Image (tube, coloured by chain):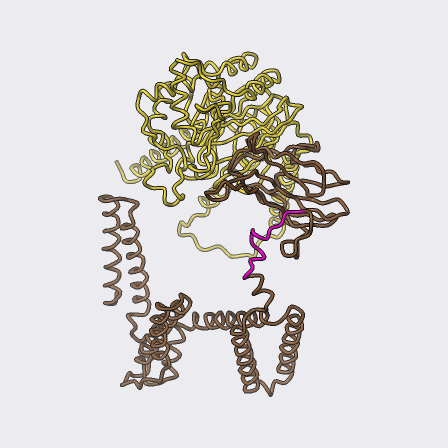
Chain colours: A brown, B yellow
Amino acid sequence: MFTPGSKYFLGLTGLSLVSAILYMVLVNPSDVGAVALFSLSAAAATIGGFALFTRDGDVWTADEAVTASTATMTPSLWPLVLALGVALTLVGLATTPAIFILGIAALVIGGVEWTLQNWADRASSEPAFNNDVRERVIGGLEYPGLAAVILVVIAFSFSRIMLAVSMEVAPIVFMIAAILVLVAGFYIASRPQMRGKLTNVIAVVATVLLLGTGALSAFTGERSELAKASKEKHFSKEHRECGEEVSKYYDKKASNNVSMRSGVFATIFVEDGKIYAQEIGLKKKLDTVTIARSKTVTVLFRNLDSAEHRLVVNLGEHKVGTTDVMEKVGTCTQVVGKNQEQALILNIAKQATPNAPYSFTVPGINGEIKLVVP
Amino acid sequence: MDTVSTVKSSSRRFSGLVAGLVATVLLAGCAKNAPQDTFQPKGENAKMINDLNLLVFPLAGIVGVLVFAFAFYVFFKFRDTGQPIPSQSHGKPAIEIVLTIIPALILSVVGVLTVRTIFDLAETKDTEMVINVTGQQWWWEYDYPAQSDMGITQPIISSGQLVLPVGTKVLLRNTSRDVIHSFWIPALNGKMDAVPGRINLLRLHADKPGIYAGQCTEFCGLSHANMRMEAIALSKKDFAAWVANQQRNAAPAPAGTKAAEGEAVFLNQCVRCHQVNGLKKADGTPAIAAPEESVYSGAAPNLTHLMSRNTFAGAKFDLVSKSCRADVWKATSEEFGAKYLKGVTSDCLNATELRSWLRNAPAMKPMYADPAKLAATGGKYRGMPNLGLSEDDIDKLVAYLLTLK
């Protein structure tokens, strides 16, 4: 019942399991050694189970298999992939992690595929039968894996193209590409006699075009405004301008509606030139909001005024580095218009003190909401 | 003895054993003193749940008994005794329809009542008072925002024991500073998760003055089982007195006393994490605790009025001795407020457990507070570490803490 290979691995499973238990009892139950031994046991059990299932890689039954003879090795690209993997791994060690990871992936894929091909080739002298044997084992993984890789490549290529073209041209490119795909699909579907070779030709041409354009776009780089925004850190804290004026960068493309409602601790309103707050459960309009320290809370800002406003949270001041220069601590929302809203997620670690009180203000509006952090 | 008699005798013994075990299990549920008994509601929200339960539970029980009885009858009556297999039929549509309609009707009734109860429990429009409840490993913090109609003119921070006025619709706004916890005081309402970054609402309403016990009911780490809470319901007059006391700053310890020495130890050791409102440093400036620098959750219990509570360490340990605790727990509704508001006096103090805690807190309540194992939390403690205090320091600290009423 048990094949020699499976006996070995199942024996290893048992031995490592016993060792793991003994380790836990005699050394330390939560040590990494116990984890390693359990992992070894699990890995050995997996391989042992696989060896048992495939009968140590022997051919299944006599009536399925053609009498084995000296099998002719089928030409294979997998040694090349394996070699490429080795090369990429070595290059990646010296250059970037991305190439290293690509190399490891090529090593694993090439190794597994070549091993399986060799194994299947020993089944018989019939290449078709051997291929079928190979398909039975790895087919379930190959096709989805290949599909995933193709989708990733397509998506990545698209993204490079979209980042390279200007904002005005990008939607047009997208529309044209989508129309082409739709038309081609309809044409092929309506001409059954043209399927097969034509489909292959169209797919190859489209893939080459996409990959080529994507590669070219990647080399060209992202559109200049994105590159500039990234270099000048337009979306960073340094450009968070919390004044009354609309900021050139920070207030671009403000998100004016908030979908998350269940975690709102307090809502601050601006209405008719006045600022007030409301909290769940308290019916009155408030001029003070109390937030316990180190608690992550969401505060919603709703602008009911006709003018555009933003909410600013003032959290005192602190010294800049080791200098005596004091800078304000706080944050703010983007500017929003009438009936629009924004959320701020706050986690205030330090108490407010009489010398350093905290508050919510709206630039351009008199008054404030006291923020008490006891 | 023949074989049949032996088998019957064994079978009877086995049945007797099973019956005995079942009876033991059932009777074990009839505890005399069960402070977390969900079948003894003490507030209107808990009563709503109990009322629904009193309908659904017996109904489910009856249905269960009938179904099991019928199933066992069928298994026994038609067991294989070698008889020929009876002729098979498709079934009886009339029986199938009846056996679909009856459960559907039962479930409809249960469903309607359940949904109605859920909506009633979620009602918040008639809230009279709000308390923010924050769970963190492994204690509960209660902060009372300013609410002038409840006499709360400035925020109150407390922990362990949630104090509320009797007959008042209190809305708890539950959240957490670290992992998910769950707030549960069975006598007053069901469970409500405290989720970091979210506000979950729970209503409490107590009919009478008293202490109502509860505990965390969402696994939250090493000391989840030790994360307790108690709700203290006081009459409105007593609640006003409690509020007035809580809003006072701590008075400095009288100079030259052991308590003053303990204050110095506190300033040296404890104020890194624990806040005492009104405590001043040697230079006269307010001592502001900075738990965010040392504690993973960024907060530690405020100890300004520690001795107005009668538990500590996440309500796991009593601050009062057994007899004093029994005195408060067993007090009648009329005298409960006065007994609770008396707080912890030196003759009632549970000095043994308090001293043990100060000596080595992680030994009393498992916490991730070993300084050598704080890599995962960026060097910050989850819970109170062993401060390595000397017995003399502990004596002084206890004397000081006794002044924090």
Instruction: Give the residue drawn at x 42%, y 39%.
Output: B221
Residue B78 rendering spot, x and y as whole percentages: 46, 47
Q: Is residue A150 above or below residue A238?
A: below
Quadrant of the frame with the C terminus of chain A: top right
Q: Residue furthest front?
A: A324
In the rendered picture of this protein, how many numbered marks are placed on residues? 0
Quadrant of the frame with the N terminus of chain A: bottom left
Residue A23 rendering spot, x and y as whole percentages: 24, 47
Q: Is residue B74 left or right of residue A270?
A: left
The residue range painted magenta reads: A231-243
Out of B398 and A105, give the one closest to the viewer. B398
Instruction: Give the residue drawn at x 59%, y 69%.
Output: A223
Out of A298 and A320, give the one closest to the viewer. A320
Instruction: Give the residue drawn at x 30%, y 24%.
Output: B390
Q: Quadrant of residue A127?
A: bottom left
Residue B364 rendering spot, x and y as whole percentages: 35, 29
Q: Is residue B88 left or right of residue A274?
A: left
Out of A230 and A33, give the one closest to the viewer. A230
Q: Main secondary structure of the magenta part?
A: loop
Q: Is residue B292 above or below residue B355?
A: below
